[in-house]
Every structure is written in structure tokens, then in C-alpha cells.
Image (cartoon, helix red, strand yellow):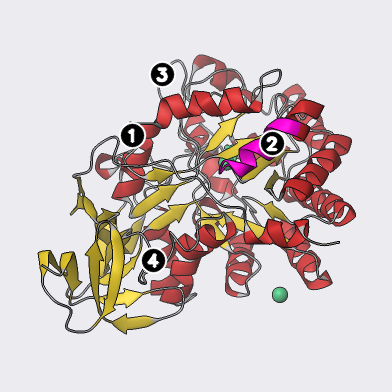
Amino acid sequence: YEFDLVIRGGTVVTAADTVRAEVGIRAGRIVSVGEKLGAGAKEIDASGLLVMPGGIDSHVHLAQPSSGGPKMADGFESGTRSAIAGGNTTVLPFALQPRGAGLRASVMEYHREADGNALADYGFHLIISDPTPSVLGQELPSLVDEGYSSFKVFMTYDDLVLTDRQLLEVFESARTCGALVMVHCEGYDAIRFMTERLERAGKTAPYYHGVSRPQSVEREATHRAISHAELTDVPIMVVHVSGREPMEQVRWAQHKGLRILAETCTQYVALTADDLKGLNMDDSGGKYVCSPPPRDKDSWEAIWEGIRTGVFQTFSSDHCPYYFEGSEGKNSDKARTSFRWVPNGIPGVEVRMPILYSKGVVEGRITVNEFVALTSTNHARIYGLYPQKGSIAPGFDADIVLWDPNRKETIRQEIMHHGSDYTPYEGMTVTGWPVMTLLRGKVMMQDGRVTGEPGDGAFLRRGRSPYAIAQANCP
Ligand code: URP
Ligand code: ZN
Ligand code: ZN
Ligand code: ZN
């Protein structure tokens, strides 16, 4: 046989093109895209289907311990199974440095969780919570060289927040070692002030989580991060932008000529603050508690505007799964005393692509090529995985999703593969659904059944982000 596998009859969609073509795969890589390819040992009929690069979700949390200690509902096995079921082939979770610990020691802990257990390929962003001189001077530069080429910093959360001085030092270090910085932009003091004020007034239901961190708090922090990036002449990625006000800050900075990248997420076009009310302000609103919180329908429109006009390069899930029931869940006795104790984060890696496809492509807001850019190609380009991942062309890994553009599905917990005991998108109907996921040529999911195994996913040693390199080279 000329190929191990040939996919025939489908429409190949990349960030650039939409073409009727066959895809020939050998040794886990795409070797040919064309017409009338020779025989494959295995052949797949993709008639009526789109043949797209497997999704890359560059913002997921797996097996990450959180403040207060509630256990995440997904480790690497269930989290990547859920990713694969949703048409993804690569995820980029975080390796969190607890204060007082070293960066390298923290990374090794996550490798112990991930290696041999993942069904999707994976790399790690670092999270820097304790930027000591040895972390910034020694550990970070060597880890960047070893393929951990991006890291996240936080402007909120007790155990993660950095001061402005620390942010500036971290940004400067990123610039010299060519790392890409992701910033969680919400202002610590404002949130604390609001939280305490609300609690004093007895306003403790999950709904008030959103009230405690309104858009102004995100807008201010976004502007502050951008100003620090300007001062240190370093590109940053503003992650999980939730609404109009922070989006406008990013757009302003981009028009000013600053290299500011930005990400938005599923929940900011699919959920609103009202979801946090639950049924009559009961505690089921906790199912939607994440940070930044979902806003309103005007913000949905602003997010679409940012997507259409290129303010946002990536669309991620921020999959951060917790249980609803149980002593560590969002509805635990402690969590019911105040929104402050509801673990922040919601599951969504499995439905990111269907929701963006349905609301974006089917409803006419973006093209199918923009869909591929937002769910795969741009993630690969920005995070140093290109040209190994993120397109369908000779030389790329054969990471492919076969997509049925007409299939209607109702999102519901019983068809999810994640570890959480609920989905915040329960009952949402979508058009467009992944029917097969291939990782380096291996069929990992077919018709909703995951056929891949733990260990099929490999660690990805990433290159530097081209955005970070450009800046590091400036005189
Ligand atoms: O609420 C969220 N999104 N939790 C995950 C952690 C983060 O800030 O991304
Ligand atoms: Zn964050
Ligand atoms: Zn613009
Ligand atoms: Zn996150």
C-alpha cells in the first residue's frame, strides 16, 4: 500500500482553504493531500463530512489542586477522553507552581499525572505564583528551552496573585527568555472589597459571584496588564476575555500598535450572569460559577465582534471541571454558605467546538475557515506547535476531526465523557458535531465511542512562540 490510511470523499477545511480532496497518511503524518491518491491499508469514507485539523484547546485545567482544596473532576485520563470525544487532539493544561515550591518540581508532578494516562497529545503552560530570583533567573529559562514555552500569571486569587512589581519583573524575564505570558486579568483588591461588602449584606448566593467581579474589575486589570506589557516591551496573551469592556481594552491596545493577543471562551457566548441565579436564586447557580463570570447578551455581541475582527486569535474552553454534588463540590455545605467558597471553573472541553461551530458557522457569524483558525491553527501558531499541529498539509501530524456539519445534537450530561457530574450547557441544541477523531492517524473516537487508550497521547515539547521570539530579538 502507498498509505497506511486514506480519507476519501470529504471536504478538507483549513484556516486558509476549503477543498474537495483526499488525505494520505503514513506513519502518523499527513504525506499527501490531493486527488486520486493510491490505496491505503485502511480507507475511511468521509462523504458529506468536513475533514478538519483536530481541535487544539490551549486553555484547560486537569488534575490541578485549587485553593481550599476541592478536587478537580478530571485528571489526565478523563479530561483528555472528553477532549477527544469533542474533536480535539491536543490540549495545553497548566502546571501550577504552589508558593514556596520550585517550577521544575511542579512540572514533574504534572508529568507524573499525565505521562501514560493521556488520550490526547499535551503540553504544559507553567503557572508562576512565586517569582523568586532563581525561578525567573534559572528555572524559567531552562524550562522554556525544554518546551514549556508559555506561562500564566494571575492578578487575583489569594494564593496566586502577583503584585504589580512582580508582574513587571516576570514580564521582563519572559522577554529575555522568549516565553509567552498569559495573564488572568481581574483586580484582586476590588474583588475582595466587593466580596466582603456583599457578604455583610447577606448576599451570598452564587449569583453574587458575578456581582463581586463586574466587567469594570476585569477592564481595569486588562488595562493594567497591557500598560505593564508596554512598559516592558513584551507581548502578552490576555486569556478568557469575558465581555465588551475588556475586549475594548485589548482592541485599543492592538490599534495603538502593541502586540497584545487575546483569547475568549465558550461560556462568554453561551452563558449569562442570569444563569448564576439558578432556579430562583437557589444554589444550582453554582454550576455556572467561573472567573471571569459570564456577562450579558450585549457582551455576547461584543465577543462576536472581537472574534470577527481579529481581536481574538483563540477560542478555548477554560475547561476547569468540578463536581456539583458531594463534599468537594460546588454545592457542598461550605460552598452553600457563600459564593466565595464555590470552586471557580466549569467543564467544557468536549463542547467547545460544537458550540462555536453552531453559533459561529451555522448562524453565519464566522466562516468555517475562521472556525479552524480559532479552534486549532492559531493555538498551534501562538504556542509553538506549528508546523507540527494545526493544519492539514504534508508534514503535519495526522490529527484530524471528521465533522458532520448537519448533525443536530442536544448537549446533555449523559453523553459527556468528562468527570464532572453535570454540564453547564445542559439542554443546548447545536448543529455540527464531531463523528471521528484521529490522533497521529489512529482512530480515537468514532460515533461518540472513544476507541483510544490512555497513553496514546504524547507529551509535546513546544518551540518558542513566534510572537515572543520577535520581541526577544528586538534591540
Ligand atoms: O473559573 C475559572 N476559569 N477557573 C479556572 C482558573 C482560571 O483562572 O483560568
Ligand atoms: Zn484564569
Ligand atoms: Zn481592529
Ligand atoms: Zn483557566
Q: Quadrant of the C terminus?
A: bottom right
Q: Which residue is mark 3?
A: 326
Instruction: Identify the amino acid type marked 2.
Output: Leu
Comes first in the chain, label 2 or label 3: 2
Comes first in the chain, label 4 or label 1: 1
Distance from the alpha carbon under mark 4 to that under mark 2: 40 Å
Q: Residue at x 53, y 46 (%)?
A: 59
Q: Is residue 107 above or below residue 274?
A: above
Q: Tell me the crowding category of disc 2: few under 14, some 14 to 19, or many 20 or more residues within 10 angstroms, Cα based.
A: many
Residues under numbered marks 3 and 4 in contact, where contact means CB atoms less than 8 Å apart: no
Q: Which residue is mark 1?
A: 78
Comes first in the chain, label 1 or label 3: 1
Instruction: Identify the amino acid type marked 3.
Output: Gly
Residues under numbered marks 1 and 3 in contact, where contact means CB atoms less than 8 Å apart: no
Local SS, label 2: helix
Nearer to us of marks 2 and 3 is 2
Q: Tell me the crowding category of disc 4: few under 14, some 14 to 19, or many 20 or more residues within 10 angstroms, Cα based.
A: many
Q: Which residue is mark 2?
A: 140
Q: Tell me the crowding category of disc 3: few under 14, some 14 to 19, or many 20 or more residues within 10 angstroms, Cα based.
A: few
Instruction: Identify the amino acid type marked 4.
Output: Ser
Distance from the alpha carbon under mark 1 to that under mark 3: 19 Å
Q: Which residue is mark 4?
A: 358
Q: Position of residue 148 (x, y in %)?
A: 58, 42
Q: Is residue 198 visible?
A: yes
- Side of 171 relative to 62 (left or right): right
Q: Is residue 134 above or below residue 375?
A: above
Boundaries of the magenta span: 138-148
